Image (cartoon, coloured by chain):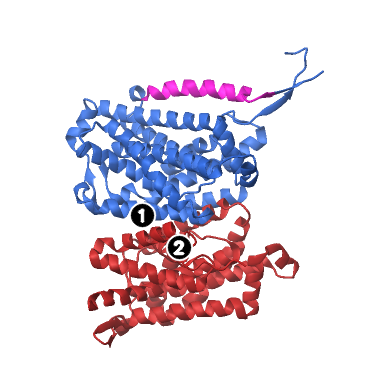
Chain colours: A blue, B red
Amino acid sequence: MRSPAVYRATRASRIAMVVAALGLIVLAAAPWWAGRADLRLMGEVFLYLSLACLWNLMAGYAGLVSVGQQAFVGFGGYMLFALTIFGGLPPIAAILIGGLLAALLSIPIASLIFRLKGAYFAIGTWVVAEVFRLTFAQIASLGGGSGTSLPVGIVRSLADGRSAREALSYWLALGAAIVVVSAVYLFLRSRRGLALTAIRDSEVAASGLGIDIWRTKLEVYVVTSAFTAIIGGLIFLQKLRISPDAAFSVNDWTAFVIFIVVIGGIGTLEGPIIGTLLFFLLRETLADFGTIYLMVLGVVAIVVMLKAPKGVWGLIRDRYDLELFPLSYRIKLNDPKDP
Amino acid sequence: MIEWINVLVQGVLLGGLYALFAAGLSLIFGVMRLVNIAHGDLIILAAYLGLSTTIMFGVHPFAAALLVLPVMAIIGYVLQRGILNQTLGPDILPPLLVTFGLSVIIQNALLEGYSADPQKLSAGAIETASVNVGSLTIGILPLLTFAIAVAVIAGLQWMFYSTALGRGFRAVSDNQDIAQLMGLNKAHVFGLAMALALAVTGIAGILLGIRTSFDPSIGGGRLIFGFEAVIIGGLGNIWGTLAGGVILGVAQTIGAKIDPGWQVLAGHIAFLVVLAIRPNGLFPRVQH
């Protein structure tokens, strides 16, 4: 008598978790072994990884393809500056409150742009981002169109000495990436994540099973907006300077993120991680070519979308049935003699 | 009072240009449900093609259109059959991401070829010519732009409902598979639709280039204006697109009148207000 057993974790996923844990310990110690420039670069990698994970949750799972996430990156950045300069809050508190405000703001925004379907939703999100950019450009006390710098006193309040500040900034980026990746992973494993996966696979069937599609998408949108704003705050804590064009740049905060997710593999958790690594590899080798590099990136993204729509990770997964984050259910026929 | 009438008239005429931005977008959405994120960058590409033609042959921008329009149409046909047809299907992600990639490629190719310096098409005396209507002064160029927009939209409407080509467009729009069974090659029909859309885009690009200075980075903004005109007017209604363009143009000139920094923002706000009150636009196509 063989009875089937349902399981999720595989040997590959267990090994991956151990390797990831060891890797994280090494990465957490980076301020002691990495140079200043490397530390900065790695911080940027983690922030992009977080943005990619969040965008992937929206586009790859909830079907909300946004080209306007720069609205929340910039909003989070500006909240850091506004709340520290005018509110006198410590930077980290300002960033977290910025995330909260973004969540509140995203609800009325969602109620408007959720009326647009598919690709029109995408451009609608872009309009919202433009409204943000133009509005912040009008605020004279934040430097208007030319922007402003974080006052020295606030920067100093972060930690004593430049290297301590840089280490803190790095740890914040690393911590944010860990929080975002684990939050997305746990969310997808939860009951709601299952609902989301069902929506991704078929909206009609999901709604037939009693899933409130609008509400599920709204939850994803609000949570993603909050996290995106927090990441935005951290990005501009690294840069120490903000301007409307940098804060709400569609290229920096959306185009790159989309390329990362598409090249890595949309709709998988591993995809954004691989995509981020490939993106920075490409950037560091081709950055000297400026515009050519962006064109290459565009071509690579188009080719991937046409020839391997599941991205690099999709190819690997299909070839080796590999899953590092155990999200799917697997069935094994148990032999009673071999428990 | 007369000042505000002037603002209104300028806004209506500006709306003609936006309707031209929107017409191509509306056409390809109507025929193949494709939203082209690179649309704005293609408008700017057309403006640069116009610039190169005027410089190379020393001709007027209107004469350059004779070359730019066919070139844009060919680009459209090749783009559609070479790349975009492969992205069409029930999933909206591939066309969206591929056209997004195209947008980045076109933008950076223009940056590489023409640098980031703002350029302008020089059309001579017509740029500053004007007529007096009562105590209003109306520029000839905006007036001409508006007239061209009306003509283009009337032409598209006529083509859609009174020609064999238009019948093909409507057939694939209604049901691709049945149209294919009836002997239409949908890949070819889509190619023709994109060719036509980009020819219209060519007109828009040249008129834009004469009206204002342009640089490779402004494509996204033009896409948004066109998109707003489409949504305000109501999806699938080509005359609605003209009305949408006009509403957007008027909102922008009123905004600019209040504070120059408010021009574009006022247009976006008008769009969001319409979206809040009438999610299907002001003149949605009647559902049969």
Q: Are marks 1 and 2 on the same chain?
A: no
Quadrant assignment, res A88: top left
- Magenta span has A16? yes
Report the residue that reaches farthest toward the left: A153
Report whether residue B141 is seen.
yes
Which chain letter goes with mark 1? A
Q: Which mark is residue A130?
A: 1
- Report how far apart the C-alphas of labels 1 and 2 lie in the structure: 13 Å
Q: Identify the residue at horizontal 33%, vertical 29% (top origin).
A: A35
- Residue named by callout 2: B227
The quarter of the picture where the N terminus of chain A appears is top right
Query: Could you tell me residue A97's position as x and y percent?
Result: 31, 35
The answer to whether residue B111 is visible is no
Amino acid found under the numbered disc labelled 1: Glu
**Placement of A271 over or under B7, stated as above or below:** above
Q: Position of residue A136 (x, y in %)?
A: 28, 50
What secondary structure is marked by label 1? helix
Whole-percent x and y of residue B269? 35, 59
Mark 2 surroundings: few (<14), some (14-19) or many (≥20) residues within 10 A: many
State the extent of the magenta-drawn residues as a range.
A6-30
Which of the chains bears the disc numbered 2?
B
Q: Nearer the viewer, residue A304 or A128?
A: A128
Q: Position of residue B105 (x, y in %)?
A: 46, 57
